[in-house]
Amino acid sequence: MTFSVLRALHTIIGDALSDIEHIYANLSGPYASPPPSPTSPVPSSNLVDFPSLDASFDPLSQAEQLTTHPTVAAAINRIVSAAGQLSATVNPPFLTICDAAMGYHLPSCLRLLEATHIPEILRDGPLHVRELANKTGVEQGKLAHILRLLATHHILREVEPDVFATNRISSLIDSGRPAATLRANPKRKYDEDGGAVAAFVGLCTDELHKASAYLTEAVFPDVDKIFPEVERSLFARAPPSNPSSTSTLPAHSDPTRAPFNHAFGCAGVGYFAWLEGEGCVSEVEVAKDHPKKNGHRRLRSIGGSTTSTSSSGSIPLPLPLKPSSSPQPAPPPQIASNPNQFRLERFGKAMAGTGSWEAPGAVLAGFDWASLPPGSTIVDVGGGIGSTTMILASDYAGTDGDGLRFVVQDRQVVVEMGEKAWRAKCPEFLDSGSVRFQVHDFFTPQPILNAAVYFLRVVLHDWPDAFAHKILLRLREAAGNETRLVIADWVLPMACVDDFGVGEESAGQVEGAEKMLAPAPLLANLGKASANVYWMDLTMQVTFNGQERTLREIVGLAASAGWKVVRVTKAPGSLFGHIVAIPVAVPISASRRARSGSGSAFFEAGEAANSRNAKNGADDGDGMEIVERASSRCGTPTFGSRVNLPSVAEAKRVRGQNALQLRKPFGYGAGAPTATATFLRQPAPIRKKTKPSPLASSSNSTVAYSPMPSPAPGSASSLRSMTVTSPRPTQPGSPVITRSSQGLHSPIARRSRTPFRSQSQIQISPRESPVPVASPRPTLSRRSSHAQLSPTGPAKQQGLRHMPSSPVLKQSSDSSRKLQQQPSPPSPIPSRIPALPRRASIAQLQPPPSSPPQPPVPAVPSKLLSPLRSVRRMGSLLLPGRASGGTLDFARYEESDDEGLHRPDLLPAGSVLAEAAQIERGQGFSRDSARSPDY
Ligand SMILES: C[S@@+](CC[C@H](N)C(=O)[O-])C[C@H]1O[C@@H](n2cnc3c(N)ncnc32)[C@H](O)[C@@H]1O
């Protein structure tokens, strides 16, 4: 049996290799028809070879560009996945354990490589370690062993004994700057374009690596019983640096008591505050606290860790700042200058390319923006400086009031930066009012009621569940019936087959949900090939106590705050999803409801529903203090933020690059889902807001929503004709369906370990929404808003029905089926909705058969370290799923059954991709007739 698995894995690798070779080989000369079989010999002349591991990374080469071709990228994923599984299967288990248990040396060695600028030193060719030691100051013997470890892991080459060279991997870390300049001024290494990967390596292998080492101290309560205090982290004995940080939150829910805080001894200080110098203890302070030890302690040369060095200088010991019994923690020490300034700047640079984490422009296809009526408001909540809004606004925001309206909300300092950037790059949007910034703390009531869309891009992953729940609840509180929530975040795939959200059996059907990314014997989540998204997940955990989430977790989290996830869209090969949710009833526990009355009803409802949240103390008082400390105050907001505002032209260029193509599961694997994206051929406009909102309605309906019938997963209709707004609101007069929280959420609760299991719910009709978009916020007192949910308050007079308090309404499987089968009401008055004047079409949303060819992508100057290169480098480096970085313009393909390669006319003529597309269609091409690739 095991042999057959091994053989199957071996075959997968062989087949995938053939697929790759097929694409590359057929670019090498006149094409023969029928296409040669993948196993036929490949002519050696003119071969476009796969990029060599031994050569430097060259993003402009055809060979490198083709690695992001969908067929190639998918094949690469299979190879990486199968190779990882083969290795785990055949390797003696103890050696695999050794690999995992001592893998910490890899980032340590990588850090030294980057910090000593060895990639830059080796740019011109191999060098003996003696010379490297001379140039770096690192002792020769040590350096040789460190570099050899990297060579053993294919990150460097040892071309002859003790002579090292870079390769395709390590050359990517080259900042492009002269090594001598860097040695003279190492702190300015990332100042110029090209340093993004180096900065990213520095960030990950320095503070994030160290933070990771303290995972157990942070999450395992019994660690106290095992290790004597002296061996535990600084954090364990040091009082919080911030006096206000004596929170009652359990540590795992506190963004200021993450593993990072253990590693750097700064309890109560958020990572970003720490980057700005908070929680760093000066030498003077240390000496004051520990006079006897004075002389044996010093700050690190870079940064403000209080890790000490023993008198021998060899064994770093944790430094007790204060006895833990101290009743009154000392105020945080004042630091004249920020000892973390270098790290702070490095972080910003490392984040510069993270826009490439998702497929370029994927946001355009993540929701059917074109279906929104003109004047609809999109609120980009925690929108940073508005980089993503820029992509949307460049297509959909009119400058004369005829388009969508955007509001970018963030913290004061970020809003100021955003306004400045927009003022400089595209003042017309601000002047026309189609885009505006707003200072808003997303833990407080949302000032824009009844928006068409609340958009949260890489916001929730920054926060522990209790805080993410609160953010969502604030939005639910402000939502109208037709409001949609769009969450853009990574979606972690389970390592096993998972039918959650897939098909009719699953009560919580989510359009676009996938059972698996790969068929057996590969791991369902593609194993090693998807590892990056788990690195990201753990990075969020160790830094902020945040996390990436599985679809179950996202659905559960959303449900806890009154949002039902109905759709997820991902670009091929990417795990970055756009998740669409509609407002439904907010769950509430009976006990809590009885006590409610003092605050926002929505807030109380949701909070009560999440008993763990309540236990966690994630309330306005304690939680908000922590938020203050955990949130960013600097220009490099939080992990994963885009810190660069694209120009309008750049944003427009992104358009068309985001085709979410039909994805076939590698041509095999019956039963596997066939698509992760839906093409929006017939967008159903969201209705004009004519009904009263749930906050002030007089409806007696309790219908949460009525799902439209769904085609069988994978069927042609399910792939081609659904619209983003598929769960249509129930029409007046249609049967009222009351779903209890148990009915609504039980599949989630059953199938996942999410804490968001409610006992009952407040039933709120989300159908009614009279509050005009962007209208002034009604002065609802908190009590009055609560009263709307109360059977004796104004809500009753207005006809809002309150849920019965005790019996949990169970939805039988019969009723569930009925619900599924219920015919969808006709699309609401689409003809009356004026078509949104789009400034340009998005090819992949509605590609007309006669679409004119897109203009070629402008040539990229082959300057070694252009900004574009650095961004692309980051993208291809960081992307879970590889292809999601999409450095090539695959998006202009029309969707098809064959990886979307049926529209080569939409590709730049003569480009590598056009050629590849032709080959895939069996048309071949003549190299003579092809002009130089445009990129
Ligand atoms: C990871 S960034 C994402 C930014 C943006 N959505 C993007 O995709 O680039 C998270 C954002 O949340 C903002 N943020 C953090 N705490 C906040 C709060 N309490 N209220 C509003 N925004 C906050 C940060 O300033 C940052 O801009």
Image (cartoon, rainbow, N blue to C red):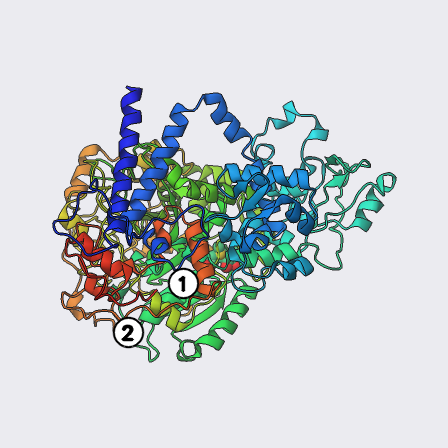
Q: Nearer the viewer, residue 908 or 736?
A: 908
The answer to whether 58 appears left or right of 810 in the picture is: right
Disc 1 under 8 Å from ligand 1? The reply is yes
Instruction: Check disc 1 and give the amino acid type.
Output: Thr
Q: Residue at x 75, y 56 (%)?
A: 335
Q: Quadrant of residue 692?
A: bottom left
| Residue farthest along the right direction in this orientation | 292
Q: Position of residue 638 (x, y in %)?
A: 53, 54
Check disc 2 and report its element: helix, strand or loop.
loop
| Marks 1 and 2, the one that precedes in the sequence | 1
Q: Could you give the CA–CA distance between mark 1 and mark 2, rounded to whole angstroms? A: 17 Å
Instruction: Check disc 2 and give the amino acid type.
Output: Arg
The answer to whether 342 appears left or right of 668 in the picture is: right
Q: Residue at x 31, y 32 (%)?
A: 522
Determine which of the numbered discs, if any, sits on residue 839 in the image: 2
Q: Position of residue 919 (x, y in %)?
A: 19, 54
Res. 196 in view = yes
For the N terminus, the image quarter is top left
Determine which of the numbered discs, if any, sits on residue 388 in the image: 1
Q: Nearer the viewer, residue 372 or 849?
A: 849
Determine whether 24 is above or below 438 in the image: above
Determine whether 540 is above or below 350 in the image: above
The answer to whether 74 appears left or right of 591 in the picture is: left
